[in-house]
Image (tube, rainbow, N blue to C red):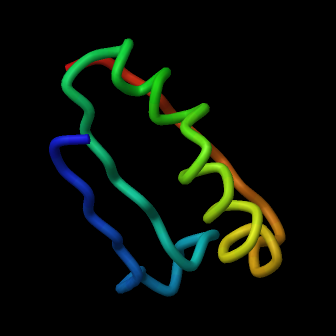
């Protein structure tokens, strides 16, 4: 991961409370991050219990 930005200051018209905007060096780096044990553990313990819905968009710059 070369950049991480958390956006929580949303407009009233938003349909979400928070956004995680991350940039990776390559598609391969994103794939490695997605299955990394530490990321998965943190997601399961500290994120998932507090999330009711999730959306994801991956795109190439």
Q: Residue sitting at 49 percent across and 21 percent down?
A: 31
> Quick check: 51 left or right of 7?
right
> Quick check: 60 left or right of 3?
right
Asked if 39 appears above or below 6 in the picture, the reply is: above
Q: Nearer the viewer, residue 40 or 20?
A: 40
> Quick check: 45 left or right of 1?
right
Q: Residue sitting at 16 percent across and 42 percent down?
A: 2
Q: How many marks?
A: 0
Of the 4 image quadrants, the one containing the N terminus is: top left
The x and y percentages for residue 58 are 46, 28
Quarter-of-image position of residue 54:
bottom right
Task: Point out the residue furthest to the front here.
Answer: 37
The x and y percentages for residue 57 are 51, 34
Of the 4 image quadrants, the one containing the C terminus is: top left
Q: Residue sitting at 61 percent across and 44 percent down?
A: 37
Q: Nearer the viewer, residue 34 or 52?
A: 34
Asked if 15 appears above or below 55 in the picture, the reply is: below
Asked if 37 appears above or below 8 in the picture, the reply is: above
Q: Residue sitting at 55 percent across and 38 percent down?
A: 36
The x and y percentages for residue 48 are 77, 67
Q: Nearer the viewer, residue 44 or 19?
A: 44
Asked if 11 appears above or below 6 in the picture, the reply is: below
């Amino acid at each position: 991961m070369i950049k991480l930005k958390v956006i929580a200051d949303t407009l009233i018209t938003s349909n979400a409370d928070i956004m995680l905007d991350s940039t990776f060096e390559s598609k391969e780096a994103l794939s490695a991050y997605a299955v990394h044990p530490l990321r998965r553990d943190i997601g399961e313990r500290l994120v998932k219990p507090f999330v009711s819905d999730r959306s994801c968009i991956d795109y190439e710059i």
